[in-house]
Image (tube, rainbow, N blue to C red):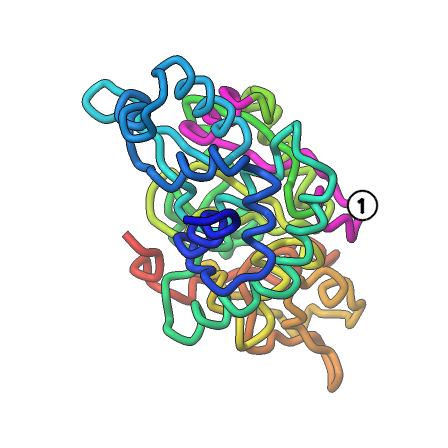
Amino acid sequence: MGTGEIYRELSRRLMMENSEILPRIWQAVCTEDEARVVAMLPGTASELAGRAERPLAEMEKMLDSLFKKGAVFESVRDGETVYRMPRHIVQFHDASLLWDGAPEEMNGLWVNFMDTEYVALLELVTQVKMPSFMRVIPINRTLDSQSRVLVYEDAARLIEEARSIAVVPCVCRKSQKLCDRPLEVCIQLNRGAEYTLKRGTGREIGKEEALELLKKAEEAGLVHMVENRAGMGNAICNCCSCCCEMLRYASNAKTAGVLAPSRFIARVDAAVCTWCGACIGVCPVRAIDMTDGPAHVKEGCIGCGLCAASCPLEAITLHEARPAEHIPA
């Protein structure tokens, strides 16, 4: 491959073959030599050294640098470390933006990409009904007492059951800079925590501090989100609707498939509602209306619970609206 073509090849592997911006991001992250090694993945250091005809020590040093840049990831196979590319564009976005040595222009490139070319990918995800990348989990205290809550849709229980926890800055607010909500509230669990601590992009925290961060996020009007699958997962994101790479597209029908709602939906007790409007102000997807009387929930509610948490009279609660099968296995 000629100069520049290797960066387009790496973009193709992330489903963005026609992107004009992503190759420039890859170029900001990797030298051409490094990019050629990334294109050889997956493989162990010794396998890659053989393919690239480089000394093992030199290859190990290069892979360590690429790992810290967020361009390669590690897993273990038969007792050996195997290196691989980012699984998808979101993983590359999040990892590379936490790289401490990132060149100044990379942040602007990512903002431009997420505001333009990323949208076409989300439209495709929605159109072909691919599984959503992330899923909302509700604020537990806003749930109706009859609701059945699974472990992996309760942020506090996920934290209580985690063996290791870390916190990193929210890369969306860090890059977009569109609001002043808390930055250090992206909670990493288990393998996610181990990954970020090894890279040096976050700090280890205990369960008590993690639970305090959840409370801080809820008070700031942030939405809890996790990977859209059953099980522990590796992170609890706390997202705003102005910067988040998922949430800000969730209220547009063409791109809504990027984010799965929780299994719950808000319900208003009209007899208790005083029309104060607090719920309208905090709803991240504009799914509450009060035009013709007491607040009522429109189509598009993602079941986050922010409206219920903000209601001074507790006129809103979340009710179970979808079966457990709503969450992919």
- Along the horizontal axis of the image, is 167 left or right of 73? right
Q: Residue at x 46, y 23 (%)?
A: 62
Does residue 157 appear anywhere in the picture? no
* x then y, percent, for residue 30: 54, 36
Q: Residue at x 57, y 53 (%)?
A: 142
* x then y, percent, for residue 79: 23, 18
Residue denoted by label 1: 180
Residue 180 lies in the magenta stretch: yes
Foreground of the two, 306 or 205: 205
In this rendering, the answer to whether 206 lies above or below 246 is above
Q: Residue furthest front?
A: 2
* x then y, percent, for residue 131: 37, 62
Does residue 222 appear anywhere in the picture? yes
Q: Residue at x 33, y 42 (%)?
A: 231
- Along the horizontal axis of the image, is 79 left or right of 301? left
Would you call the spot at circle 1 few (<14 residues within 10 Å), some (14-19), or many (20 or more)? few
Foreground of the two, 276 or 6: 6
Foreground of the two, 224 or 254: 254
Disc 1, SS: loop
Q: Quadrant of residue 115?
A: bottom right
In this rendering, the answer to whether 219 lies above or below 80 is below
Q: Residue furthest left?
A: 78
**Start and end of the magenta stretch?**
174-199
Q: Quadrant of residue 184?
A: top right
Q: Residue at x 53, y 62 (%)?
A: 19
Q: Amino acid at mark 1?
A: Asp
- Along the horizontal axis of the image, is 187 left or right of 176? left
Q: Quadrant of residue 219?
A: top right
* x then y, percent, for residue 212: 64, 31
Residue 162 lies in the magenta stretch: no
Q: How many marks?
A: 1
